[in-house]
Amino acid sequence: MSPGPRVGRLAPRIIAICAFAACLAIPAIAHGQTDEIQVYDGGLAPVGVFNLTLHNNFTPIGITTPAFPGAVVADKSWNGVPEWALGVTPWFEAGLYLPLYSRDNTSGFGLDGFKLRALFAVPNADDRTFFYGANFEFVPATRVAYNFSSGWTVAAEEYDDFGPIHAFLPAGEQVHQLYGVVDRKWGDWEIEGGIGVGMTDASDRLTLKLILARDLNKRSSARSASPAPAHP
């Protein structure tokens, strides 16, 4: 189904707004605690469909010192965010993270603002049996997954922070985490759970993540919207 004329006219404006806002938000995001642990798999909301994804992660065993004064202490912290998304075209999805929230043993519960994101993918990429995905939202993240015909998906994900591009940190000071992940769809909900382990002293030792997602509205088909044929 092709996008409606209104959505088609709005797409360039939405892309421009997202790009501009992302540039403004870079300083704040670059110094924030991780609110989501996800590598996008190429799945986009259908055109005109609103989607909600709930991100939550808990770190039972993590780094005990803040990355900077006032930062969330990772050890035994809980971080998350609702992610609101709209399918704009078959290859573009606009998203808003609001509100970012966190809780640690030092500062307690707090709201950490919001951020915009733009997601581009090959149309119908999530229908493929095997795929490879990568994120480059300030630090690289990769995912290799296999979709079973039963509806289950198993994946391995790695999240890395090598330090500044112009001067990588020593190996022991870099962040490297490896996750085992399973995905499943039940009814209208898509559920993802994962367990991550740190591979360096600078990484959180153990992190748990849970992601819940569902469409908030359904796209009506052209057939159901058309009147019933008249009978002689």
Image: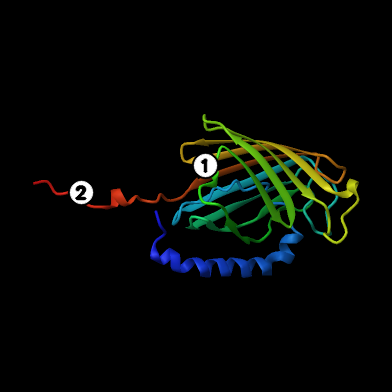
Question: Mark 2 touching mark 1, by CB under 8 A?
Answer: no
Residue drawn at the location 58% of the way across and 56% of the way down: 120
Name the one closer to the observer, 148 or 48.
Answer: 148
Label 2 or label 1, whichever lies nearer to me, is 1
Corner quadrant of residue 204: top right
Q: Give the crowd class for mark 2: few <14, some 14-19, many >=20 residues within 10 Å.
A: few
Image coordinates of residue 138 in percent, x first then y, are 74, 57
The reply to whether residue 97 is in sight is no
Residue drawn at the location 68% of the way across and 70% of the way down: 24
Type of colouring? rainbow
In the image, residue 195 above or below residue 13:
above
Q: The residue under label 1 is which amino acid type?
A: Asp
The reply to whether residue 153 is in sight is yes
Residue drawn at the location 49% of the way across and 65% of the way down: 11
Q: The residue under label 2 is which amino acid type?
A: Ala
Image coordinates of residue 136 in percent, x first then y, are 70, 55
Image coordinates of residue 66 in percent, x first then y, are 83, 53
For residue 87, side relative to residue 70 (left or right): left
How many marks can you see?
2
The secondary structure type at the circle numbered 2 is: loop
Name the one closer to the observer, 137 or 144.
Answer: 144
**Residue holding disc 2:** 228
Q: Which mark is residue 105?
A: none
For residue 229, side relative to residue 88 (left or right): left
Precedes in sequence: disc 2 or disc 1: 1
The secondary structure type at the circle numbered 1 is: helix
Name the one closer to the observer, 207 or 79.
Answer: 207
Q: Which mark is residue 127?
A: 1
**Residue most extreme to the top:** 150
Corner quadrant of residue 99: bottom right
User: How far apart in space, not on screen, are marks 2 and 1 (Cα)?
Assistant: 32 Å
